[in-house]
């Protein structure tokens, strides 16, 4: 039986691997910003990074 009240069948999780250096940078930036936990800041940071790459790919599609 699942006892977690915060999970739903529709919830999905994506995991990213980052270098130790990038991990430390994310934690430091989260501490400086102060309004987000390190995990919340990491999620925001990685989503922005993924979205910016998606936008670049849409603007500059590679020709076959």
Image (cartoon, helix red, strand yellow):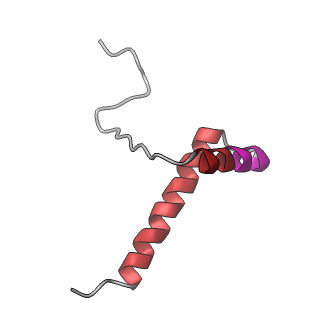
Task: Name the residue furthest bottom.
Answer: 63
Side (left or right) of 11 relative to 32: left
Side (left or right) of 24 relative to 11: right
Tell me which residue sits at (53%, 61%) in the image.
48
Quarter containing the N terminus: top left
Image location of residue 45, percent across then percent down: 57, 55
Tell me which residue sits at (28%, 33%) in the image.
9
Label tally: 0
Quarter where residue 24 is shown: top right
The magenta stretch spans residue 42: no
Image location of residue 2, percent across then percent down: 33, 16
Tell me which residue sits at (56%, 52%) in the image.
44
Task: Name the residue furthest front.
Answer: 20
Q: In this view, does 18 lie above or below 51?
A: above
Quarter where residue 14 is shown: top left
> What span is colored magenta in the figure?
27-33
The dominant secondary structure in magenta is helix
Quarter containing the C terminus: bottom left
Q: In this view, does 10 lie above or below 52?
A: above
Depth check, front residue: 26 or 20: 20
Side (left or right) of 35 relative to 20: right
The magenta stretch spans residue 29: yes
Tell me which residue sits at (46%, 65%) in the image.
51
Q: In this view, does 26 lie above or below 64?
A: above
Q: Is residue 40 above or below residue 8?
A: below
Task: Name the residue furthest left.
Answer: 64
Image location of residue 59, percent across then percent down: 40, 84
């Amino acid at each position: 039986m699942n006892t977690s009240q915060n999970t739903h069948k529709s919830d999905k999780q994506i995991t990213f691997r980052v270098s130790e250096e990038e991990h430390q940078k994310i934690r430091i930036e989260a501490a400086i910003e102060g309004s987000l936990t390190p995990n919340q800041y990491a999620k925001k940071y990685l989503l922005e990074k993924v979205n910016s790459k998606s936008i670049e790919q849409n603007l500059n599609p590679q020709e076959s």
